[in-house]
Amino acid sequence: MVLRLLRELAQQPQKIGVMEIIAPPWSAQPAARDWVAPVSRRGHARSFHAGLPGYAPTPLVDLPALAAGLGVGQVLVKDESARLGLPAFKVLGASWACAQVVAGRTGADLNLAALRQAAQGSGLRLVTATDGNHGRAVAWMARLLGVTATVFGPAVMTATARQAIVSEGAQFEEVDGNYDDAVRAALAYTQDGAGRQLVQDTAWPGYEQVPARIVEGYETLAGEIDDALTISPDLVAVPVGVGSLAQAVVTHYRRAGASRPAVLSVEPDTAACFLASMVAGKPVTVPTGATIMAGLNCGTPSSAAWPVLRAGCDAAVAVGDADAATAVDDLARLGISSGPSGAATLAGVRAALTGPGAGARREALRIDGGSVVVLLSTEGRSAPGPLARQP
């Protein structure tokens, strides 16, 4: 479905940089590295995270075997399989946004003790939609703050993901539809009762403030990468669902005075909404299908992320389930626990830097044999055993 849409878009006369529909689906923006991002409030969220129980920077792991296979100097994997006791990076955005919501409603200072005290008896209920990790992160933060949470999710969510949310004390509501339908259901529920506050990680016109706080929270991850490196990376690969993490990464590396690596977005080929939007030159909603990359199974880019990625993301690539599953297994053999949505970055970099047409793609990304590549592995593997690969 998505590949057919990309082919149709590519046939339309547009000035969109480089486009390949023969494997891999790919688009590049030559001027992206010259864009300068607006100033963000990046330091505030990191200070808050440092005060949460169990906070520590996650590992940045050097994997020479991957570098040899990709024909680059170094590959480093940012391993988010154990972030604040949860198996994904999402808690960085959810915790900061939830803190801001409570502070905004109660006037409390932005530290955990003050927020917990202020939240008691407030009648606040945090509401969100999810395809897995974000919903659990909101539920976790609600429990930490001592408030209730309701999480909406599409019917295709796994039983394991649902149970993880319920285990945090949240109420889970199944939606007969996809992720976008779950977001609409969460919004309607929020509007239908007092004390309910939507904490959603995608933006749309009229709903931008909370998603902006989530993006600020994600910048902690990029700051940790800076601290761990003695040299600047040449390429950072980011998995993309609605694009909020990629928005944080692009904002971080395109700020004035920052190192300016290439940024590569990676999506499932069944839900490549950013790639399709890049090809179209405007936000596009795509039909979504089943994929093992459940955390990236989103059909509409965030309205806040889109202009940032359109201006500052160097390239986008889409990968299939088989390649993501192979990446999961390869990372596991190298000691990295990574679920399909996290391992998608390895699959995406392989698609971009190797195979037919790789020379042009490497040139677009300015990658050579000495380049330093950072892969964001955004989730741990939820269960052992073979993955249910989609055709």
Image: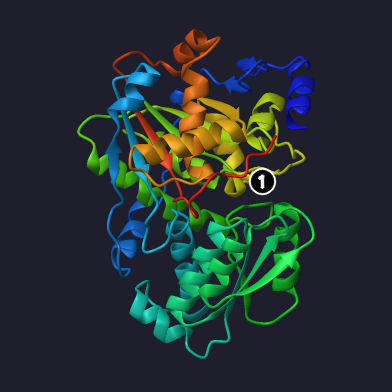
Q: Is residue 37 left or right of residue 227?
A: right
Residue drawn at 64 percent across, 30 percent down: 275
Q: Quadrant of the C terminus?
A: top right
Q: How many marks?
A: 1
Residue drawn at 53 percent across, 33 percent down: 265
Residue 259 x, y percent position in the rendering:
32, 30
Q: Quadrant of the N terminus?
A: top right
Q: Residues within 10 Å of mark 1 (few under 14, many from 20)?
A: many
Q: Is residue 284 left or right of residue 382?
A: right
Q: Residue furthest left?
A: 230
Q: Identify the colour scheme used.
A: rainbow
Q: Is residue 113 above or below residue 172?
A: below
What is the secondary structure assignment of the residue under circle 1? loop
Residue 8 x, y percent position in the rendering:
79, 21
Q: Residue furthest bottom?
A: 121
Q: Is residue 303 above or below residue 169?
A: above
- Which residue is labeled 1 in the image? 298
Q: Is residue 203 above or below residue 128?
A: above
Residue 29 x, y percent position in the rendering:
55, 21
Q: Amino acid at mark 1?
A: Cys
Is residue 102 shown to the viewer in this render?
yes
Q: Residue furthest front?
A: 385
Is residue 104 shown to the viewer in this render?
no
Residue 115 x, y percent position in the rendering:
41, 79
Q: Is residue 237 left or right of residue 208?
A: left
Residue drawn at 34 percent across, 37 percent down: 334
- Camera-side residue: 15 or 148? 148
- Camera-side residue: 138 or 311? 138
